[in-house]
Amino acid sequence: EGHLGVTALCGMAFLAGGHLPDRGEHREVVCRAQDFLLRHALENGLLTSAGTRMYSHAFATLFLAELHGMGDDERVKATLERAVNLIVDCQNQHGGWRYNPFDRETDLSVTVCQLQALRAARNIGIRVPPETIDRAVAYVQRSRVERGYTAGLFYYKIYGRGAYEKDAEYAINAAGLTALSSAGIHDEARNAPVLDFLERSYPRLARGYSTHFYYWYGNYYAAQAFYQEGGTRLRGFFGRLSRDLLAAQEPDGRWRNSVGPGDEMATAVACLLLQMPKQYLPIFQR
């Protein structure tokens, strides 16, 4: 979604390694990422650059929430509060979000991004109305498949054009489960079909889409879903994922993304995933 969302992901990759604006070997990089986002905050709260939309806004809000939780920069706090208020204000009639602010359509992918940003902000004391979370969670719960071969999985959309068509997408199911975890909802019985599906689907994704946006976006959420589960499922998934990531790293240190925002995004996500056990970021904490 353009430079803003990628900048936020790159910033989070450095935060995940313990680098902050005022300390750490790469503090200057984190400062530049922070300043870039602050410069691209509109008065209405939207964080945008070169036409980026709600995906990038959510990742940027998440990054600012992590920064504010680790420091006391008043500029970050003020920008974060406006960004959170925008998310709250543009929640639509279904309880979710779509690509643009105040969009009347809804999909699970964009909704998960907003929920994670709200969770991170709420965790550090930023006001988030409980009803906003409740309505979003209700939308996610309604997105579950109720019967048939894919029962327990999540639809990408349940309203409008394309509703009920995608019910076996790796990234969407990882995102759906992560959304509920972000809202504090943990139901082992209902989680099991999704985790089973992710375990079955990972090898095919890794073989056919290892440099595609699907792989990076999907595993950004799958890793969080398995981390919330813990135990043998987490050890099996993270062991396989980390081996694949280490084997795929290029000699110059980057990871490849041939379809999507580019190698910067892939490298940022890979670094986030490999640093997951450090638990510096709230999204990787139980």
Image: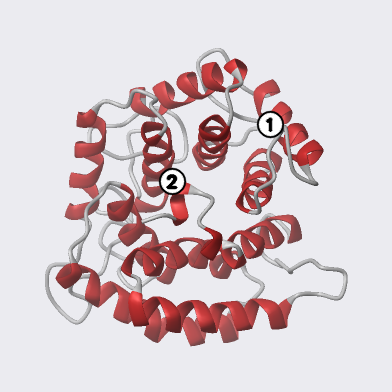
Extreme residue in the right direction: 252
Dot 1 amino acid type: Gln
Residue 99: x, y in percent? 46, 40
| In the depicted structure, whether residue 126 falls above or below residue 123 | above
Q: Residues within 10 Å of mark 2 (few under 14, many from 20)?
A: many
How far is disc 2 from disc 1 in space, using C-alphas? 19 Å
Q: Quadrant of residue 189?
A: bottom left
Q: Which mark is residue 84?
A: none
Residue located 18% across and 74% down the image:
151
Q: Secondary structure at mark 1?
A: helix
Residue at left offset 19%, top offset 54%: 141
Instruction: From the image, state whether disc 2 or disc 1 is nearer to you.
Output: 1
Residue 51 relative to residue 29: left or right? left
Q: Residue visible at 66% across and 54% down?
A: 17
* Residue 27 picture location, percent across and down: 76, 39
Closest to the observer: 152 or 82?
82
User: Measuring 35% from the left and 63% from the top, which residue is drawn there?
Assistant: 228
Q: Is residue 30 above or below residue 35?
A: below
- Measured along the vertical axis of the image, is residue 66 above or below residue 187? above
Mark 1 or mark 2, which is nearer the start of the sequence? 1
Question: Which residue, as the protein is rendered here, is positioned at the far front?
Answer: 23
**Is the N terminus in the top left, top right, bottom left or bottom right quadrant?**
top right
Q: Which residue is mark 1?
A: 34
Query: What residue is shown with label 2?
Result: 113
- Asked if residue 261 lies left or right of residue 25, the reply is left
Q: Nearer the viewer, residue 258 or 25?
A: 25
Nearest the viewer among 259 and 45 is 45
Neighbor class of circle 1 (other Cα within 10 Å; few <14, some 14-19, many 20+) is: many
